[in-house]
Image (tube, rainbow, N blue to C red):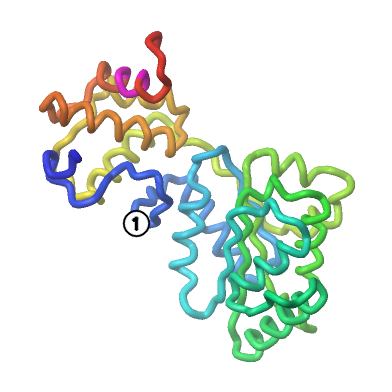
């Protein structure tokens, strides 16, 4: 609605994890590099954690683009399944037709696929998002997948992404075998106050902004205070701010407009 008013070519604060908009703060760059290192060096397991909306999925999608055609990738976004369903979902993400197979035959088909990949000097990566929701049984099934290997290489690299609770889960004694196999770990922290300003300007520039709209220092301070530096919350507030500016025919987003946006998001009058 407000794109034409501000002269933008893309919605700057869309909530979808578009890697085109990835802002490489020092933290996000480190997360990106940890993922690439763990996968390219065939470390087996990589763990990436962070608060809801911190940017884990966006970093992961940017990493996909960097990997290129040498890697087959499978992304599980909803791991709340039973063991049979999870194995089928993984195999089908790799393009295998396992609809009428049981779990044993599904794993066998997956193993054959991974062996063919290895023969062609290709790699395979499995990313499981929201991994904190996996039961202990499912985490054990995922660990067993890491046993698929040849004499000199792991056939499958596995990335476990999740909220901070995932770290707590993996510290449980019952999961010590899995925890001991995770060679690369990174926890993605929120943006600092200065980074929030840089993040907002970055997304506006990617969207084609030519100096308008602009956020005042007070607006950015209030934005950081409310969001805690979580990119998803920053996006939600900024989208409301731009709509308010459009309605009021104003290009500058100030402290007051951020307050209005927060009130609309939370349905409160005391912000």
Residue 162 lies left or right of residue 138; in this view the side is left
**Pointer 1 local density, CA inside 10 Å: few below 14, some 14–19, many at least 20:** few
Q: Position of residue 259 (x, y in %)?
A: 32, 18
Residue 52 lies left or right of residue 87; in this view the side is left
Q: Position of residue 214 (x, y in %)?
A: 19, 32
| Residue named by callout 1 | 20
Q: Residue furthest front?
A: 100
Residue 6 visible, this orientation: yes
* Residue at position x 32%, y 23% in the image: 261
Query: What is the quadrant of the C terminus in the image?
Result: top left
Q: Is residue 139 magenta?
A: no
* Front position in the image: 24 or 149: 149
Instruction: Name the dominant secondary structure of the magenta segment.
Output: helix
* Front position in the image: 244 or 215: 244
* Front position in the image: 108 or 161: 108
Q: Position of residue 151 (x, y in %)?
A: 79, 84
Classify 101 as above or below 87. below
Classify 112 as above or below 199. below
Query: What is the quadrant of the N terminus in the image?
Result: top left
Number of numbered discs visible in the structure rendering: 1
* Residue at position x 68%, y 72% in the image: 156
Classify 24 as above or below 112. above
* Residue at position x 61%, y 60% in the image: 76
* Residue at position x 29%, y 45% in the image: 203
Extent of the magenta region: 259-263
Classify 6 as above or below 244. below
């Amino acid at each position: 609605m407000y794109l034409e008013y501000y002269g933008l070519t893309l919605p700057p604060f869309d909530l979808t994890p578009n890697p085109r908009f990835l802002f490489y703060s020092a933290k996000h760059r480190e997360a990106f590099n940890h993922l690439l290192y763990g996968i390219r060096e065939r470390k087996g397991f990589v763990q990436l954690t962070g608060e809801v909306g911190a940017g884990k999925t966006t970093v992961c999608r940017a990493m996909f683009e960097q990997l290129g055609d040498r890697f087959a990738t499978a992304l599980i976004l909803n791991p709340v399944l039973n063991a049979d369903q999870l194995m089928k979902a993984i195999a089908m993400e790799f393009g295998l037709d396992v609809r009428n197979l049981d779990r044993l035959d599904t794993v066998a088909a997956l193993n054959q696929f991974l062996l063919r990949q290895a023969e062609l000097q290709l790699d395979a990566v499995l990313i499981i998002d929201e991994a904190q929701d996996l039961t202990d049984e499912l985490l054990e099934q995922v660990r067993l997948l890491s046993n698929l290997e040849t004499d000199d290489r792991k056939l499958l690299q596995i990335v476990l992404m999740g909220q901070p609770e995932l770290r707590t889960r993996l510290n449980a004694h019952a999961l010590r075998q899995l925890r001991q196999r995770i060679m690369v770990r990174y926890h993605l922290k929120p943006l600092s106050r200065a980074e929030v300003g840089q993040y907002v300007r970055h997304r506006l520039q990617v969207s084609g902004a030519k100096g308008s709209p602009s956020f005042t220092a007070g607006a950015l301070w209030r934005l950081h205070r409310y969001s805690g530096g979580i990119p998803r919350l920053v996006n939600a507030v900024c989208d409301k701010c731009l709509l308010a500016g459009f309605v009021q025919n104003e290009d500058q987003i100030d402290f007051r407009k951020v307050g209005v946006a927060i009130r609309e998001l939370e349905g409160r009058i005391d912000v």
